[in-house]
Image (cartoon, rainbow, N blue to C red):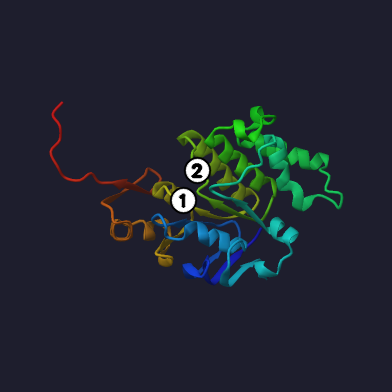
Amino acid sequence: MSTVEIDGLSAGYRGRTVVSEVSAGIGSGGWLGVIGPNGSGKSTLLKAVLGLVEHTGRVLVDGRAVSGLRHRDRARALGYAPQLPQLPVGLTVTDYVLLGRSPHTGLLGRETGADLDVVAEVLDRLDLTRMADRKLPTLSGGERQRAVLARALAQRAGVLLLDEPTTGLDVGHAQELLDLVDRLRHERGTTVVSTLHDLTVAGQYAERLLLLNGGVVTAEGTPEEVLTADTLEKHYTARISVLSAPDGSPVVAPVRAAGPRQES
């Protein structure tokens, strides 16, 4: 179980600031959803939390500064599933997911039976068992996305950083994936920080939302507090209606422009 504290985090590339002065706290087993229009800095924020881009400010996991952790300890604390991963061409799905066990292997770097058991469990839970021996390039986009998440889950890190985890997935596999992540945080206390494009999905799964626009935080709170028509219309420049699902979570629906309808 891990807590995450982001304190005054600014980050960017080649001297250009992309996100500025972001602060947020996530309790153990919590789920923070990062939303915002395209180009608002969501992916950059996740990379800064992991230490992959130049940044100022602090990121603490269980009170320890991520910047001070050795690579192996960082990989045990933080699991990361990027939106656009670079996948090794020659590896099978099993070999690739086994890479997630690297922070836990001994000095010789050899996997144990326990490591193989973890991988088998993850493959099963993500409906990848029948693809275990297939080479990564033979997978569809959605299958590759599940393999990337499987590798991150195999790390058994206390914090999961997920960048648009449902990209390329059909609605059924997207629900299965998000339900699995939700179970992990309830069963194991895994803390989740994810960027999410689908605002309705963000409202269903995340406990708290952080809305970025132009690299700064423009709204933060519960889904009900952040996903309002006024807020979304302002920051997404869109016509929005916010409805209510049977469980009470907000449903964000686009509103068609007024105009003549075609007669059937």
Amino acid type, label 2? Thr
Which residue is pictured at 65% across the width and 51% down the height?
Answer: 188
Marks 2 and 1 close (CB-CB < 8 Å): yes
User: Mark 2 vs mark 1: which is more N-terminal?
Assistant: 2
Question: Does residue 234 appear in this view?
Answer: yes
Image quadrant in which the C terminus is located: top left
Foreground: 147 or 33?
A: 147
Residue 212's spot in the image, x, y percent? 42, 62
Residue 185 is situated, as x and y percent measured from the top left of the image, at 60, 51
Which label was assigned to residue 241?
A: none
Q: Say if 36 sits above or below 244 in the image.
A: below
Q: Quadrant for the N terminus, please.
A: bottom right
State left or right for residue 119 relative to residue 233: right
Q: Is residue 234 left or right of residue 53?
A: left
Q: Is residue 74 above or below residue 174?
A: below
Whether residue 249 is visible here, answered yes or no, is no
Q: Is residue 161 above or below residue 169?
A: below
Q: Residues within 10 Å of mark 1 (few under 14, many from 20)?
A: many
- Left or right: 241, with 162 as reference point: left
Q: Position of residue 22 (x, y in %)?
A: 49, 69
Viewer-nearest residue: 168 or 150: 168
Q: Secondary structure at mark 2?
A: loop
Q: Height in image: 217 above or below 42?
A: below
Toward the front, the furthest residue is 14
Q: Which mark is residue 166?
A: 2
User: Who is closer to the viewer here, 221 or 18?
Assistant: 18
Task: State the residue at coordinates (42%, 67%).
Answer: 217
Residue at 63% x, 48% y: name it: 187
Spot occupied by residue 58 in the image (x, y as percentages of width and height): 59, 72
Q: Which residue is mark 1?
A: 196
Amino acid carrying mark 1 in the image: Leu
